[in-house]
Image (cartoon, grey):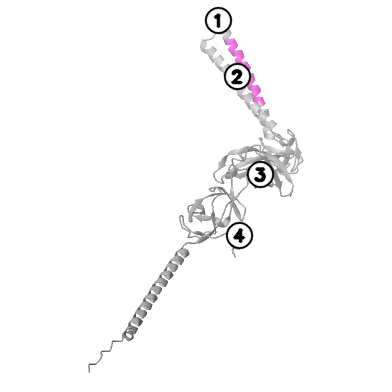
């Protein structure tokens, strides 16, 4: 009997193969997922690294300043006319008619000087003048006689010339003696000291019996100031120099008169900037007929100066101080530009910018020291935008 062949079992041999395929597929999926996860992680790390390397900054827009604002500057009150009075002759003070605080008129006698030496010199000069005139008369008579005698050849031509020369010399002696007398008479007039203008005596440095000198050794006798009209000198910064013109109104306030302002106008300017202080000297005339104001006082002068160009205000924490000058950082298209600016007035927490800005810039607040020109930055949202976020 022929044995019947048994067919092979296919199901039992496929099972391990399928298991192997499944394991390999799972391993491939796991490997692919791991590679994908690592790629995403590396991408995220790279993105975070790039974001961390770009600083985030807060920005503000410049606030526009007004075209005309009041500025206050320190001033010095001075007498409109001020003079020191010296003696032009030597002697002793015999009378004094004015003292400190005395109000005097123009031409009023302030003091009288006793000059015994000048008096004697004047007497001597007058005597010398009389002698010179007598000699001149004699020389003229002699010359006239020789002029007649020469007609009859009684004298020589030489004698006539000598007589005429002597007469001319005597005339010169008279002129010299007369000039000396006039000089001493002028010194005699200086014995009386007059007030050159109406004002008040602010200093008196002599008294009766004091020795009075003249020339380089002279000492100031009186000091007089005209206080009916005063001038206030102010140093205006170069920024506002062009706006400070004669005729512009100004008001003056003094510490001894708090809350009260005295009106005045700019009368004159120096017309030149002082290279040491970079300021323009300005003088304001004030009427002081009431005598309320005193020369030498400290004053605060208020100006309303219109600026030639629009100004802006920025907080002080936007300024960058570099070796090449003052800068602010401006953000445009995600990059920083360091822009030079020129400051005007300092208001404490804010400063005035007179040049360098147009008003449309976004200025960095609290810029880091490492910030450079052309650096990429991200702009943080403003505070109102943060509050709107849920």
Give the residue displayed 45% in from the left and 65% down from the top: 47
Q: Residue at x 66, y 44 (%)?
A: 303
Residue 278 position by quadrant: top right
Which residue lies under the disc numbered 3? 303
The prevailing secondary structure element of the residues shown in magenta is helix
Give how far across and how far down residue 183 sits, in percent: 64, 28
Which residue is the site of mark 2? 171
Magenta span covers which residues? 126-146
Residue that label 4 marks = 384
Q: CA distance from mark 3 to mark 4?
A: 38 Å
Alpha-carbon span between mark 3 and mark 2: 68 Å
Q: From the viewer's perspective, is the residue at label 3 or at label 4 nearer?
A: 4
Q: Which residue in the structure is indicated by mark 1?
A: 152
Helix, strand, or loop for circle 1?
A: helix
Q: Give the position of the C terminus as an image quadrant.
A: bottom right
Identified at 59% across, 60% down, the residue is: 385
Measure the alpha-carbon separation of dots 4 and 2. Answer: 105 Å
Q: Nearer the viewer, mark 2 or mark 1?
A: 2
Q: Earlier in the sequence, mark 3 or mark 1?
A: 1
Q: Residues within 10 Å of mark 3 (few under 14, many from 20)?
A: many
Crowding at dot 2, Cα within 10 Å, few <14 / some 14-19 / many 20+, comes out as some
Q: Is disc 4 placed on a helix, strand or loop?
A: helix
Taking the view exactly as shown, the residue that stands out farthest to the right is 290
Q: Is residue 284 left or right of residue 279?
A: right
Q: Position of residue 358 (x, y in %)?
A: 55, 47
Judging depth in this view, the residue of 279 and 49 nearest the camera is 49
Question: Counting residues from the N terminus, which is met first, the one under dot 2 or under dot 1?
Answer: 1
- Look at the image and say whether residue 145 sits in the magenta stretch: yes
Q: Residues within 10 Å of mark 1 (few under 14, many from 20)?
A: few
């Amino acid at each position: 009997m022929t044995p019947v062949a048994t067919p092979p079992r296919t199901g039992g041999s496929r099972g391990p193969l399928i298991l192997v395929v499944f394991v390999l597929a799972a391993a491939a999926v796991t490997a692919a997922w791991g590679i994908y996860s690592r790629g995403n992680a590396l991408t995220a790390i790279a993105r975070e690294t790039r974001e961390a390397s770009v600083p985030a900054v807060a920005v503000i827009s410049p606030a526009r300043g007004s075209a005309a604002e009041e500025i206050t500057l320190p001033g010095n009150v001075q007498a409109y006319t001020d003079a020191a009075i010296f003696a032009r002759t030597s002697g002793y003070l015999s009378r004094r008619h004015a003292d400190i605080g005395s109000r005097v008129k123009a031409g009023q006698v302030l003091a009288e000087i006793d000059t015994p030496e000048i008096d004697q010199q004047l007497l001597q000069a007058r005597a010398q003048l009389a002698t010179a005139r007598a000699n001149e008369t004699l020389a003229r008579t002699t010359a006239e006689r020789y002029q007649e005698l020469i007609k009859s050849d009684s004298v020589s031509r030489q004698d006539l010339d000598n007589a005429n020369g002597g007469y001319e010399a005597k005339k010169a002696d008279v002129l010299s003696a007369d000039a000396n007398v006039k000089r001493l008479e002028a010194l005699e007039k200086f014995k009386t000291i007059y007030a050159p203008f109406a004002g008040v005596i602010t200093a008196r440095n002599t008294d009766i019996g004091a020795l009075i000198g003249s020339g380089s050794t002279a000492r100031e006798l009186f000091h007089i100031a005209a206080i009916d009209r005063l001038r206030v000198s102010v140093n205006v910064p170069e920024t506002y120099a062009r706006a400070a013109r004669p005729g512009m109104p100004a008001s003056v306030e003094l510490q001894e008169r708090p809350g009260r302002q005295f009106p005045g106008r700019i009368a004159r300017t120096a017309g030149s900037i002082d290279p040491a202080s970079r300021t323009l000297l300005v003088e304001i005339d004030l009427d002081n007929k009431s005598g309320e104001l005193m020369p030498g006082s400290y004053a605060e002068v208020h100006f309303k100066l219109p600026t030639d160009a629009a100004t802006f205000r920025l907080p002080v924490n936007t300024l960058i101080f570099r070796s090449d000058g003052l800068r602010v950082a401006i953000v445009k298209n995600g990059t920083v530009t360091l822009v030079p600016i020129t400051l005007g007035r300092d208001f404490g927490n804010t400063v005035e910018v007179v040049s360098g800005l147009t008003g449309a810039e976004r200025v960095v607040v609290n810029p880091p020291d490492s910030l450079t020109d052309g650096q990429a930055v991200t702009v943080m949202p403003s505070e109102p935008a943060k509050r709107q976020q849920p």
